[in-house]
Image (spheres, rainbow, N blue to C red):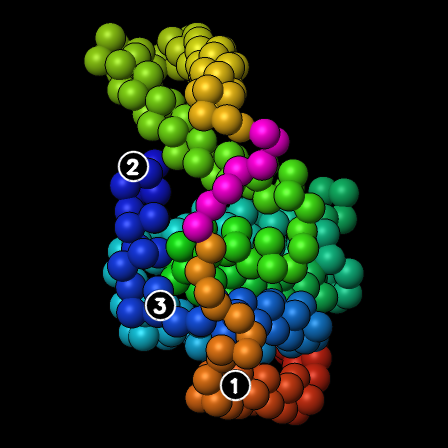
Amino acid sequence: MSIFEDTLDHYTMHNELTENNIYSKLIFALLAILLNLITGSPIVPLIIFLICSFLILFVAKIPLRFYVTFMAIPIGFAVLSGIFLAFLGTGEQIWSLGFFGIGLTKGGINQALLVFARVLGGVAALGFLILTTPMNRIFAVFHDLHVPAIITDLAILMYRYIFLFLDVTATMYNSQRTRLGYHNYMSWMNCLASLAGMVFIRTWEQGEISYKALASRGYNGRLNMIREGDSISDMSIKDWLLIIIFVVVIAVAIYCLGTANLYPV
């Protein structure tokens, strides 16, 4: 938890791609996610994952340890989903659990591999945008795209208080641990319930305090923020060429690989 509290914003503002045009990174990420979703072969998402990971680690120079931590949770969910898909898929069964006809099938394994690869590629593409771009510049894009102001303001407040309440939760959790909490199952359940209740109360109280603070500063329903001057017209020819090359390479891979599977059917 602390790694996200202490370093996520730091790395978005201190990497080699921070000052690059936000629209070049946004267009690249959106195209990567789109291509990642339309492919029928798990090989293409893996290629997208490798390209995005290379850009994050060696171009933006985000530390490997932090990147692995960033990817750990979505990969964990992908592994669990893949296990269920492998056992619930259709096709020739290659191994059976011995009851209810449940077992591993070739179709299930290929479907699990495809979903897992798409998660890797999609999260890496989204991570490229998130890890290399400060959130205030992303919110500025919302304004340029004429997203309703209420949605942008809610996103700003949510992003701000996510880290605040993670810090509150971590502090309360450590306090419970120092008082011998979580030492057995019943203690774990009681401490978790108490923690959830207190975080809810603190959230409610902080909402009231924040509104009063905003009202005292002339809040009129809009959050004003400094916006960067990036625009699509400011994108360099180099950025356009790199994006076009990426799209062509992935499109050719999609065409050539088709629905090729990692596990032979």
Q: Mark 1 is on which residue type?
A: Trp
Mark 1: few/some/many CA within 10 Å (<14, 14-19, 20+): some
Residue 151: x and y in percent read 64, 41
Depth check, front residue: 207 or 120:
207
> In the picture shown, does residue 50 fall above or below 257?
above
User: In terms of image quadrants, where is residue 89?
Assistant: bottom right
Q: Residue at x 61, y 50 (%)?
A: 81
Q: Which residue is mark 2?
A: 2
* Residue 71 in picture, x, y percent from top left: 42, 54
Return the residue found at the far front: 218
Cα gap from disc 2 to disc 1, whole angstroms? 37 Å
Q: Earlier in the sequence, mark 3 or mark 2?
A: 2
In space, the residues marked 3 and 2 are separated at their CA atoms by: 26 Å
Secondary structure beneath dot 2 equals helix
Query: Which label is found at residue 240?
Result: 1
Tell me: residue 223, above or below residue 226: above
Magenta-highlighted residues: 220-226
**Residue found 29% across the figure and 74% down from its top:** 58
How many numbered discs, if any? 3
Q: Is residue 221 magenta?
A: yes
Q: CA distance from mark 1 to mark 3?
A: 16 Å
- Residue corresponding to mark 3: 19
Mark 2: which amino acid? Ser
> Of tags 3 and 2, which is closer to the observer?
3
6 or 36: which is nearer to us?
A: 6
Question: At 29% across and 21% down in the image, what residue appears?
Answer: 171
Please provide percent x and percent y for residue 157.
51, 34
Q: Secondary structure at mark 3?
A: loop
Magenta span: predominant SS is: loop
Q: Is residue 90 at least partly visible in the picture?
A: yes
Kind of residue at disc 3? Glu
